[in-house]
Image (cartoon, rainbow, N blue to C red):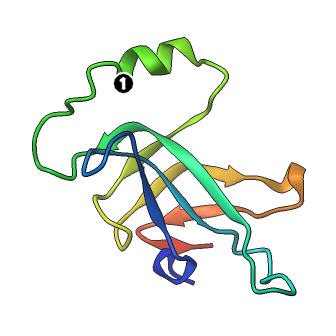
Amino acid sequence: MRLTDLSPHWIVLRNGGDAVGITFRCPHCPPGERGESTYLGVFFSTPVDRDQTQTDEANWPQYMVEHPERKYWARSGEDFDTLSLTPSVDVSAHGHWHGFITNGAVT
């Protein structure tokens, strides 16, 4: 399965800004009775520079420092087809998916 099959969306701090994370449909959960989906989300340790300029979210590093309870994933790739995340995404404690995203492949 590919990440693009799971309706991925960037998480941004402002419209048109750098992508600081991603949400996507849980690969483990079937659609509900009304067609609703469960979405998972992760934050990146380094944002995706979508506008090809340096990160202008001046408070981004401070935000990470102020919220150590959050977990951040190392990211490589600049789009959904090439995205890789480490470590694995593990939401199994909540009855959802545990797996890997590597070069856009979801395993």
What residue is pinned by disc 1? Answer: 60
Instruction: Please state which of residues 97 and 14 is positioned toward the viewer in this rendering.
Output: 14
Instruction: Please state which of residues 106 and 34 is positioned toward the viewer in this rendering.
Output: 34
- Residue 36 image position (x, y, % from top left): 75, 78
- Residue depicted at 77% across the width and 53% down the height: 91
Residue 61 to residue 8: above or below: above
Instruction: Please state which of residues 15 and 3 is positioned toward the viewer in this rendering.
Output: 15
Snapshot quadrant of residue 82: bottom left
Residue 103 lies left or right of residue 97; in this view the side is left
- Residue depicted at 10% across the width and 41% down the height: 53
Residue 45 lies left or right of residue 41; in this view the side is left
Residue 106 lies left or right of residue 69; in this view the side is left
Residue type at tag 1: Trp
- Residue 77 image position (x, y, % from top left): 31, 58
Residue 29 to residue 75: above or below: below
- Residue 66 image position (x, y, % from top left): 53, 12
Q: Quadrant of the C terminus?
A: bottom right
